């Protein structure tokens, strides 16, 4: 069994890393050479990883165009091999890769859009969760309200950017108008992925909303999260934020 494992490992390295195939692999094929056979496997491997990236990053693909995306993907695949049997896990490093990808340096927002797309991609595969009914708060006496701890939907991910990544993402969704203008100098953006049923969406948060939510995600009780947020944002509106996050199915339980 160990010999078989060794041979399979050598075969995988030949496909993924371009190493010389094992001497035990048959070479007496009549229709094609060993090198051709290995290249067929290698092309299938690259093709599957390209398709995985295209599925996880449809907005990046639209922004780059098919040919440029294919070239970018091949460069990424050379640098990052698949390390999971689940192709949905492939591509997590793309944002970091794009930061240093010289061919796309003019698209300064590209890496941040990739961060948002990966947040959306992982959000889609998170576990389902029930929706919080604000009426549940009524079962807690007022003296317990400061100690309430909210649970946050695992699909909720916050992405911060110097660029309007929410507007860019929204403009490249199915059914979006083709008549749009995006000002890259419009200021910072805080985008949040969330999921309602099986649909992943993106909403933009104010700085105070994002800070409060991050305290809640860290497990802080209601009073501690609110007091900490008010220290930095005197105009923070707890009631409005609660209603917004419950409506978006971001807050899913309270205890």
Image: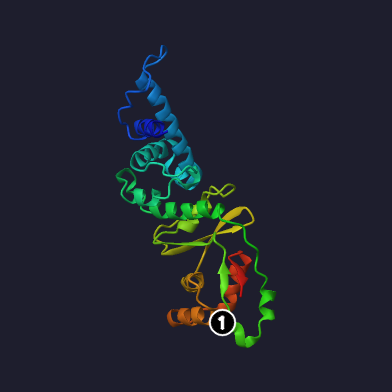
User: Residue shown at 40%/14% (left/top)?
Assistant: 29
Task: Work out which residue is located at the far top of the displayed protein and give it.
Answer: 30
How many numbered marks does the figure carry? 1
Q: Position of residue 170 (x, y in %)?
A: 53, 54
**Res 164 seen here:** yes
**Residue holding disc 1:** 147
Q: Quadrant of the N terminus?
A: top left
Q: Quadrant of the C terminus?
A: bottom right
- Rendered image coloring scheme: rainbow
From the viewer's perspective, tell me whether residue 85 is left or right of residue 104.
right
Q: Position of residue 55 (x, y in %)?
A: 51, 43
Work out whether residue 141 or residue 57 is closer to the camera in this orientation and state it.
Answer: 141
From the viewer's perspective, tell me whether residue 98 is left or right of residue 190.
left
Mark 1 neighbour class, 10 Å CA radius: few under 14, some 14 to 19, many 20 or more: some
Q: Position of residue 177 (x, y in %)?
A: 56, 49
User: Residue shown at 57%/50% (left/top)?
Assistant: 176
User: Residue shown at 55%/49% (left/top)?
Assistant: 173
Work out whether residue 83 or residue 108 is closer to the camera in this orientation and state it.
Answer: 83
Work out whether residue 254 or residue 193 is closer to the camera in this orientation and state it.
Answer: 254
Work out whether residue 114 or residue 103 is closer to the camera in this orientation and state it.
Answer: 114
SS for tag 1?
helix
**Res 181 seen here:** no
Q: Position of residue 73 (x, y in %)?
A: 40, 40
Task: Work out which residue is located at the far bottom of the displayed protein and give it.
Answer: 143
Relative to 130, residue 81 above or below: above
């Amino acid at each position: 069994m160990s010999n078989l494992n060794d041979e399979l490992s050598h075969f995988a390295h030949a496909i993924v890393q371009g190493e010389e195939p094992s001497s035990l692999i048959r070479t007496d094929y009549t229709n094609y050479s060993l090198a051709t056979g290995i290249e067929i496997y290698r092309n299938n491997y690259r093709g599957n990883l390209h398709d995985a990236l295209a599925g996880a990053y449809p907005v990046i693909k639209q922004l780059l165009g098919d040919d440029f995306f294919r070239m970018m993907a091949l460069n990424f695949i050379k640098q990052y091999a698949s390390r999971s049997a689940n192709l949905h896990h492939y591509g997590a490093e793309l944002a970091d890769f794009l930061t240093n990808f010289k061919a796309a340096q003019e698209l300064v927002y590209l890496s941040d859009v990739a961060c948002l797309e990966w947040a959306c991609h992982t959000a889609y595969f998170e576990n389902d969760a029930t929706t919080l009914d604000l009426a549940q708060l009524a079962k807690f006496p007022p003296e317990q309200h400061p100690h309430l701890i909210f649970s946050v939907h695992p699909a909720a991910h916050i992405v911060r950017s110097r660029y309007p990544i929410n507007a860019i993402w929204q403009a490249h969704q199915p059914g979006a108008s083709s008549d749009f203008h995006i000002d890259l100098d419009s200021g910072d953006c805080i985008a949040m992925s969330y999921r309602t049923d099986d649909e992943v969406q993106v909403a933009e948060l104010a700085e105070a909303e994002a800070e409060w939510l991050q305290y809640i995600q860290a497990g802080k009780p209601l009073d501690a999260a609110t007091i900490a947020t008010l220290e930095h944002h005197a105009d923070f509106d707890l009631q409005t934020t609660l209603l917004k996050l419950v409506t978006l199915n971001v807050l899913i339980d309270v205890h």
